[in-house]
Amino acid sequence: MNYIQYTGVIFGAVYGFIYRLICEREVVDTIYNIYNIYTVSFVWVLPIVIAIIPIVFARKELLNSKWKQFAFPFLSVLIFFILTLSSGVEDWLCILIISFPFLITAGIVGLVLAPFIKNRSSKKLYSIMLLPFILNPVESLLPNKSEKFRVETQIVINTNQEVVWENILEVPEIKEAEYNYGLLNWIGVPRPIKSKVYTTDGQKVRIGYFSEGLRLYESISQIDTLHYVEFKILLDKSRLRDLPTDKHLLQSGNFYFDKIYYRLHKINKDQTKLTLTCDYTLNSKMNGYANFWANTIIKDFEVRLLNSLKHKIEKQM
């Protein structure tokens, strides 16, 4: 078996991993402002280069096999994922978020570009590896686009407004058996446990307790008893997890929680409609793709939280 043909697979993965380290704030903080992961260069250009490298290294073997044209770039990206996971640079949720562009690109680049690579000069092809290093600093000179988004979820709880109100200001402990875990929970999204209201320096503050030690401090910015309550998350006072997900999403400066609020609407004396809304801001060059994942994660969280509250409240009746 010709093992040399697999050299490009390994080299592509290592190349991507080195580039990822350069974009990591804690590894190379001095150049973080010009090389970071919240760019088209990282999300789309890097996987193209990772996918091309195995083809350049083994042109003869790959150009005669459609299967290898597909499999080798795909394998190179998978090894890149393994390297970032095992090193702790990424976690499973981060991998899921970048997997769409990386795997889609890996799957088609070989099949589409292999015929064009056949008679190209190796030196010119190797110069492709410079693309992400050139484009990322150029992107850093362009302004981010700031946009506001909203996710809203409603549920009907079979009890009166007073009971529902008591259970949203201070959410009672939600035991594991009372929470319906989903895929996102298993790969990194924390589950809510409870929330408590404290008075600090004359101001009421709510602390949300989550799995894996996450604690979110929230100021109660507006309240209309039995009808409406609004919270603002204070990330500077919160206790975040030492995980890539929290660092990349909550501390990046590209995502902000604006406010979270509950609205209660009395249907009748035995039914209340509860609405949970999250307003947030995205500040990046890829707000469309970023919002797809922000919306997906927040919506999943809201649905599971409200279902757990409904189950717990109605069980008490």
Image (cartoon, rainbow, N blue to C red):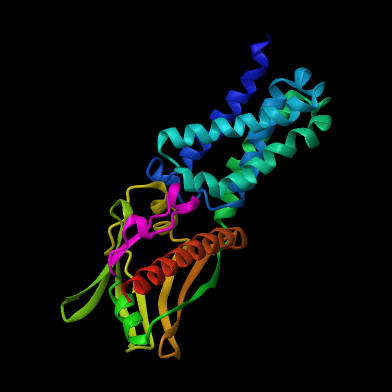
Horizontal placement of 52 versus 298: left or right? right
| Residue closer to the observer: 315 or 181 | 315
Image coordinates of residue 102 in percent, x first then y, are 62, 42
- Name the residue nearer the viewer: 264 or 45: 264
Number of numbered tags placed on the structure image: 0
Q: Residue at x 49, y 69 (%)?
A: 281
Residue 284 lies in quadrant: bottom right
Q: Is residue 22 left or right of residue 123?
A: left
Specify the quadrant that holds the C terminus.
bottom left
Q: Quadrant of the N terminus?
A: top right
Coordinates of residue 191 in the picture (x, y in percent) = 38, 57
Image-quadrant location for residue 261: bottom left
Residue 159 placement (x, y as % from top left): 39, 82
* Residue 127 counted in the magenta span: no
Rendered residue at 60%/29% (across/down) = 12
Q: Is residue 222 visible?
A: yes
Residue furthest to the left in view is 201
Q: Is residue 175 found inside the magenta-colored segment of the image?
A: yes
Residue 154 vs 71, above or below: the answer is below
The residue lying at 39 percent from left, 52 percent from top is 247
Q: Give how far across and how far down residue 126 sits, in percent.
A: 68, 28
Residue 19's place in the image compared with 308, above or below, is above
Residue 272, above or below 34: below
289 left or right of 254 in image:
right
Tell me, yes or no, if residue 135 can be seen here: no
| Highlighted magenta segment, given as a residue range | 172-194
Q: Nearer the viewer, residue 220 or 16?
A: 220
* The furthest residue to the top: 1
Along the line of sight, which residue is nearer the eye, 144 or 63? 63
